[in-house]
Image (spheres, helix red, strand yellow):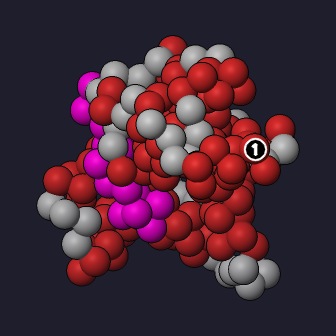
């Protein structure tokens, strides 16, 4: 049964604030456990809310999770953009790609189990799968814009293949416990794979 404090907190929040509180709670829950292990009731408890309110604002567990994935993708993209923009003008393109990888590793290390779950065959709703697929296309285009390689079919495969290599390398890193002393080795391997498949760093 909800406490008087919980009921009072729910009553004080306006519509936007309550919805944001539920989403924030879901972000915390899904950072600790994958989709299949987090229930709507878990999110409601974390948000000091009720399952009825979670369904009212998000419609379904799948829709709520899709918003969690959208928020995580946006946060990662913004952090990578900031890191790349901090690189001085005239620096090698390789340095910018390295900066994006290091941010990605920070993102993974913060919640390795939930990051790895989809790659290991963990259950995710179609809505979240579609968001991840769209995000991957955005990552490829951002890398293409950064490197501006020649318009060759080989380079298209290289850009898409790089992210597949990076994910598998990071999955191996996660299986080792995300050791800090292996970050440079992983990063150099990913950079080498990209450079090798492109043939250079673009024009």
On the image, the x and y values in percent for residue 77 come to 66, 54
Q: Residue at x 63, y 63 (%)?
A: 80
Q: Farthest front residue? A: 4
- Determine whether, in the image, residue 14 is placed left or right of residue 45: right
- 2 or 118, nearer to the observer: 2
Q: Residue at x 33, y 43 (%)?
A: 33
171 or 112, which is in the foreground?
112
Task: Identify residue for label 1.
Answer: 11
Secondary structure under the numbered disc 1 in the rendered image: helix
Query: Residue at the spot x=45%, y=67% of the render?
Result: 106
Where is residue 22 shown, x and y percent of the image?
63, 42
Magenta range: 106-121
Please, is residue 184 above or below residue 127 in the view? below
Determine whether, in the image, residue 88 is placed left or right of residue 27.
right
Q: What residue is rendered at 63% in x and 44% in y?
A: 7
Q: Residue furthest bottom?
A: 88
Please tell me whether the stretch drawn in magenta is mainly helix, strand or loop.
helix
Eyeballing the image, is 27 above or below 40? below
Q: Quadrant of the N terminus?
A: top left
115 part of magenta stretch? yes
Please tell me how many numbered marks the rendered image carries: 1
Q: In this rendering, does residue 191 appear at all?
A: no
Whether the magenta-drawn stretch holds residue 23 is answered as no
Density class for disc 1 (Cα within 10 Å; few <14, some 14-19, many ≥20) is few
């Amino acid at each position: 049964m909800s406490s008087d404090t919980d009921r009072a907190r729910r009553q004080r929040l306006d519509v936007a604030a309550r919805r944001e509180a539920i989403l924030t709670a879901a972000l915390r829950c899904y950072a600790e456990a994958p989709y299949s292990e987090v229930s709507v009731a878990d999110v409601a408890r974390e948000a000091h809310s009720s399952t009825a309110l979670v369904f009212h604002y998000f419609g379904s567990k799948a829709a709520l999770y899709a918003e969690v994935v959208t928020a995580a993708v946006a946060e990662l993209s913004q952090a990578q953009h900031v890191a790349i923009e901090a690189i001085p003008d005239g620096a090698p393109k390789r340095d910018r790609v390295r900066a994006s990888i290091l941010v990605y590793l920070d993102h993974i290390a913060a919640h390795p189990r939930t990051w790895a779950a989809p790659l290991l065959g963990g259950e995710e709703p179609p809505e979240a799968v579609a968001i991840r697929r769209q995000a991957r296309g955005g990552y490829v285009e951002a890398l293409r814009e950064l490197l501006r390689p020649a318009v060759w079919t080989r380079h298209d495969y290289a850009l898409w293949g790089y992210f597949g290599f990076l994910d598998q390398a990071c999955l191996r890193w996660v299986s080792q416990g995300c050791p800090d002393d292996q970050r440079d080795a992983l990063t150099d391997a990913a950079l080498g794979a990209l450079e090798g498949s492109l043939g250079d760093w673009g024009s």
